[in-house]
Amino acid sequence: MVRRMTEIRINGHVFTGVMRGSGIVDYHFFRFVGTLGFEPFKGTLNVKLDQPVDISLYSTKAIEHVLLDGTKKINALLAPVILIMKREGKEEHYDCWAMRDLSNIYPADIIEIVARDNITEKFSMKDNEEVIVTFFDIGKKSKK
């Protein structure tokens, strides 16, 4: 069986959110480390996409835990993405994770980016700056 992987690129714009990304990453810090395999920057980059996205279609990991009654509680879905920024006529690519906190504070056209670095500082990003977010769809198994 072979898995086919396709990608979808969605344009978006950076914006200043409600300043809760640092609290989410800090609260779940050790789960992020265990799930993603690195220590993330304690904050997120907010991106308003040009179209809504169902992150569950691209999610490969989740921040979750088991409650005392044995039920699984998922706090956030995580999807590997490539963030593309245009700098001086060239594209810069940065591997990171799109997060959808399931408390649903944001609509489906807004994602939060979790990364090793403070992306805003690393790339001198400003509000309303255009970016491209590349999502990967692993697809269904097919026989070859």
Image: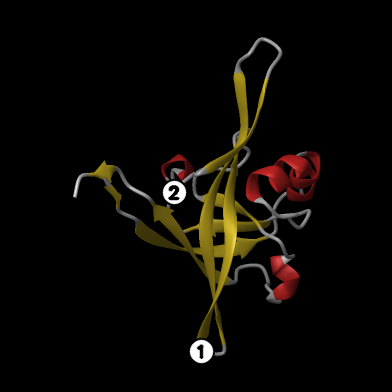
- The residue carrying pointer 2 sits among few (fewer than 14), some (14 to 19) or many (20 or more) residues within 10 Å by Cα, namely few
Which quarter of the picture shows residue 76?
top right
Q: Is residue 92 above or below residue 120?
A: below
Q: Is residue 8 above or below residue 100?
A: below
* Tally of numbered tags: 2
Q: Nearer the viewer, residue 106 or 71?
A: 71
Q: CA distance from mark 2 to mark 1?
A: 28 Å
The residue lying furthest to the left in this view is: 144
Q: Which residue is mark 1?
A: 89
- For numbered disc 1, what is the local secondary structure? loop
In which quadrant of the rendered view does residue 140 lie?
top left
| Amino acid type of the residue that numbered disc 1 sits on in the rendered structure | Gly
The circle drawn on residue 25 is: none
| Quadrant of the rendering where the N terminus is positioned | top left
- The image shows residue 131 at horizontal and vertical percentages of 53, 69
Q: At 60% from the left edge and 68% from the top edge, which residue is drawn?
A: 128
- Which element carries disc 2, helix, strand or loop? loop
Could you tell me which residue is drawn at 75 percent across and 46 percent down? 25
Label whose residue precedes the other's in the sequence (2 or 1): 2
Mark identifier at residue 52: 2
Q: Position of residue 69 (x, y in %)?
A: 66, 9
Q: Which residue is pictured at 64% across the width and 49% down the height?
A: 36
Q: What is the x, y in percent for residue 65? A: 67, 27
Q: Which residue reaches farthest top?
A: 69
Q: Is residue 19 rendered to the left or right of residue 102?
A: right
